[in-house]
Every structure is written in C-alpha cells, then in structure tokens.
Image (cartoon, grey):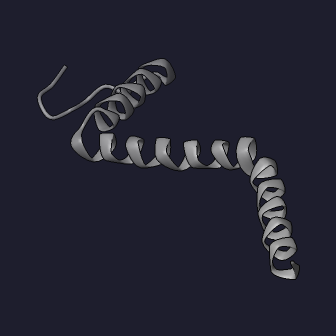
Amino acid sequence: MPHGRRRRLTKVERLVLGFKLVIAFLLSHVGLCILVIAYTIFGALIFQVVEGPFEVNFKKHVKNACFSTEMR
C-alpha cells in the first residue's frame, strides 16, 4: 500500500470503530456527567410514577383534615 492512501473500512470495521468511540466518550468525564444527569432524571421520573398516586391521596387527606379542624 502506498503511503498516504488508506484502505476503506468495511461496515463491520466501521461499526466496531463507532462502538469504541461511543464507549470512550461515555467513559470520559463529560460522558460520565451526562450519564449521571440522565440517571437522575430517569430516577425522578420513575419515582413520580410510583409515588405519584399516593402523594395525590395524601394531599387530599391532609386538606380534608385541615378543613375539618377549621370547622370545629
């Protein structure tokens, strides 16, 4: 192969190279920060789905309890 000429990468080689680049980015400081932020947001959404109905019922209960004590 002459100097200055590169051979073309196959689809598999490009896929492997792309995968390596993605892994390298995710393990960098910026990638780790993005992963932590995504993990936090995803955890908050899961928490709202799981605890949301209980929170609504609890707020109604507290509101009714406060209202009933005001009327006494």
Q: Residue at x 22, y 42 (%)?
A: 29
Q: Residue at x 64, y 49 (%)?
A: 45
In which quadrant of the rendered view does residue 28 lie?
top left
User: Which residue occupies the extreme left position in the image?
Assistant: 3
Quadrant location, the N terminus = top left
Query: In the image, is 45 to the left or to the right of 34?
Result: right
Between residues 20 and 67, which one lies in front from this camera angle? 67
The x and y percentages for residue 20 are 34, 25
Give the tally of numbered discs: 0
When the figure is inspected, residue 70 is found, relative to residue 33, above or below; the finding is: below
User: Which residue occupies the extreme bottom position in the image?
Assistant: 71
Quadrant location, the C terminus = bottom right
The x and y percentages for residue 30 are 27, 47
The x and y percentages for residue 19 are 42, 26
Q: Residue at x 83, y 59 (%)?
A: 61
When the figure is inspected, residue 72 is found, relative to residue 60, above or below; the finding is: below
In which quadrant of the rendered view does residue 57 lie?
bottom right
The x and y percentages for residue 24 are 28, 31
When the figure is inspected, residue 9 is found, relative to residue 43, above or below; the finding is: above
Query: In the image, is 15 to the left or to the right of 2?
Result: right
Between residues 56 and 29, which one lies in front from this camera angle? 56
User: Which residue occupies the extreme front position in the image?
Assistant: 72
Between residues 4 and 38, which one lies in front from this camera angle? 38
Q: Residue at x 84, y 76 (%)?
A: 67
Between residues 55 and 35, which one lies in front from this camera angle? 55
When the figure is inspected, residue 1 is found, relative to residue 5, above or below; the finding is: above
